[in-house]
């Protein structure tokens, strides 16, 4: 995913430096070129050979190292970098960067870089909260440098509080947001629904389905990486929240209906990938229904049809809104999906067959057909992220 991208990791003197070895490894697995620059103090916590082994590049420390190819090292690195992450960033180095001091390889390269710069502070709570450090952080932010708020928890010094560097996964997400995809959706507001709904029978039981939310979460992630402002309305799922998107958690079809209609006026694109229940019990028992009561049937009523309501909203109030629905079928897939497209006033519908190998609930892949009023595009089996990429490619062509 990051082939051809260049990332500089700046490592300073902090116990959290060991985490950057894991981050470097993650980046290399994504085919990214990684250069690591360390301060001299960072060597007290991790050996440069570790980074050289993981990245296959020389780990740079001394600005005046004579053992390199003939070019101005900090300038050549700065020119090719797509993003520069300083993590962990000590109070000392934060102060230098905020003041424009360039007295080692890391701070010199940092000043020379024109790419996106991200700083992840890591230090004792009292140091982090010191007004001088906070002023330096604000200075960096005023210069357009993104500062990652540290986590709170048990620190290496034994204190409890803020100052802990976030996990490697969080640091990677900041890099991915910046360079993983072209920002062809910047300025667009996208609303995605995902996962199942639960319709209560009593306080213990409910009616639901097998949706895991993977397709909807892949759509939200893809739109976010392409620069969109994303709202993800999700039923209860066992998936980590998508970073940098607004999460709206719901339970029932009624909850999802209200959340979607509330977000519709501010949306440019709505992709409804959730598997919303079509029916709910007419009456929900306040207490657990006992087996001894002879309970043998549940009377059902229709839930609100979210797509139909959105189609009506589009026709009446916002014709520029792009509506994309999903259609999971087990027979007559194209015929049923085209009818749904027309009936509900959609711009696009994504159809798949639950019985097709590699499609359906719980898989990491999908096999879909993208249907519009004048075209059908059948996609081969691919990851749900790649399906999401293709869906938004089709949407952008039609907006």
Image: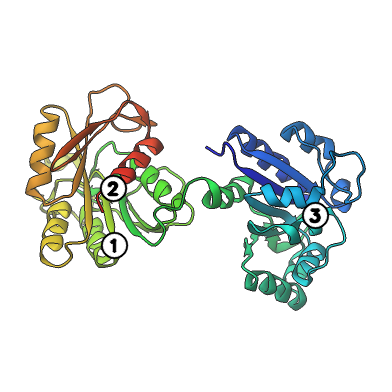
The front one of 149 and 200 is 149
Q: Which mark is residue 267?
A: 1
Residue 119 position in % (x across, y down): 68, 59
Q: Nearer the viewer, mark 3 or mark 1?
A: 3
Q: CA distance from mark 1 to mark 2?
A: 18 Å
> Residue at 82% of width from left, 49% of height from top?
72
- Residue 312 seen in render: yes
* Quadrant in which the C terminus appears: bottom left
Query: Count the marks: how many?
Result: 3
Helix, strand or loop status at disc 1: loop
Are the residues flagged by discs 3 and 2 in contact, CB closer than 8 Å? no
> Residue at 44% of width from left, 55% of height from top?
227
Relative to residue 366, is residue 341 depicted above or below? below
Colour scheme of the rendered structure: rainbow
Are the residues flagged by discs 3 and 1 in contact, CB closer than 8 Å? no
- Looking at the image, tell me whether mark 1 or mark 2 is earlier in sequence order: 1
Q: Residues within 10 Å of mark 2 (few under 14, many from 20)?
A: few
Residue on which the image places disc 2: 397
- Looking at the image, tell me whether mark 3 or mark 1 is earlier in sequence order: 3
Quadrant location of residue 159? bottom right
Left or right placement of residue 209 versus residue 20 in this view: left
Residue on which the image places disc 3: 106
Relative to residue 201, is residue 107 depicted above or below? below
What residue occupies the far front of the structure in this picture? Answer: 70
């Amino acid at each position: 995913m990051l082939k051809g991208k260049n990332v500089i990791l700046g490592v300073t003197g902090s116990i959290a430096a060991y985490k950057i070895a894991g981050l470097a490894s993650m980046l290399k697995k994504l085919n990214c070129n990684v250069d690591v620059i360390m301060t001299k103090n960072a060597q007290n916590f991790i050996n440069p050979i570790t980074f050289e082994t993981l990245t296959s590049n020389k780990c740079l420390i001394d600005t005046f190292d004579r053992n390199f190819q003939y070019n101005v090292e900090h300038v050549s690195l700065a020119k090719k970098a797509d993003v520069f992450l300083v993590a962990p960033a000590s109070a000392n180095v934060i102060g230098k960067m905020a003041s424009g001091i360039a007295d080692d390889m890391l701070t010199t390269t940092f000043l020379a870089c024109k790419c996106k710069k991200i700083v992840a502070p890591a230090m004792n709570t009292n140091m982090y909260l010191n007004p001088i450090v906070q002023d330096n952080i604000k200075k960096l932010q005023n210069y357009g440098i993104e500062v990652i708020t540290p986590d709170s928890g048990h620190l290496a010094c034994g204190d409890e509080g803020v100052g802990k560097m976030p996990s490697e996964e969080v640091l990677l997400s900041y890099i991915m947001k910046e360079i993983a995809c072209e920002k062809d959706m910047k300025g667009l507001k996208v609303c995605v629904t995902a996962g199942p709904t639960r319709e209560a029978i009593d306080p213990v039981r409910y009616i639901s389905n097998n949706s895991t939310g993977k397709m909807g979460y892949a759509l939200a992630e893809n739109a976010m990486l392409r620069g969109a402002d994303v709202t993800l309305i999700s039923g209860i799922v066992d998936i980590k929240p998508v970073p940098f998107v607004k999460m709206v958690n719901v339970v029932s079809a009624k909850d999802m209906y209200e959340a979607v209609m509330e977000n519709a006026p501010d949306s440019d694109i709505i992709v409804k990938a959730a598997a919303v229940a079509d029916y709910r019990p007419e009456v929900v028992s306040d207490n657990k229904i006992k087996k001894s009561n002879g309970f043998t049937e549940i009377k059902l009523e229709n839930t609100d049809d979210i797509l139909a309501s959105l189609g009506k909203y589009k026709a009446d109030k916002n014709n520029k809104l792009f509506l994309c629905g999903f259609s999971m079928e087990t027979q007559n897939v194209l015929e049923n999906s085209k009818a749904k497209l027309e009936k509900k006033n959609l711009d696009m519908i994504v159809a798949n067959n639950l019985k097709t190998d590699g499609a359906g609930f719980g898989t990491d892949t999908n096999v879909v057909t993208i249907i519009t009023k004048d075209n059908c595009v059948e996609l081969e089996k691919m990851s749900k992220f790649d399906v999401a990429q293709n869906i938004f490619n089709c949407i952008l062509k039609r907006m």
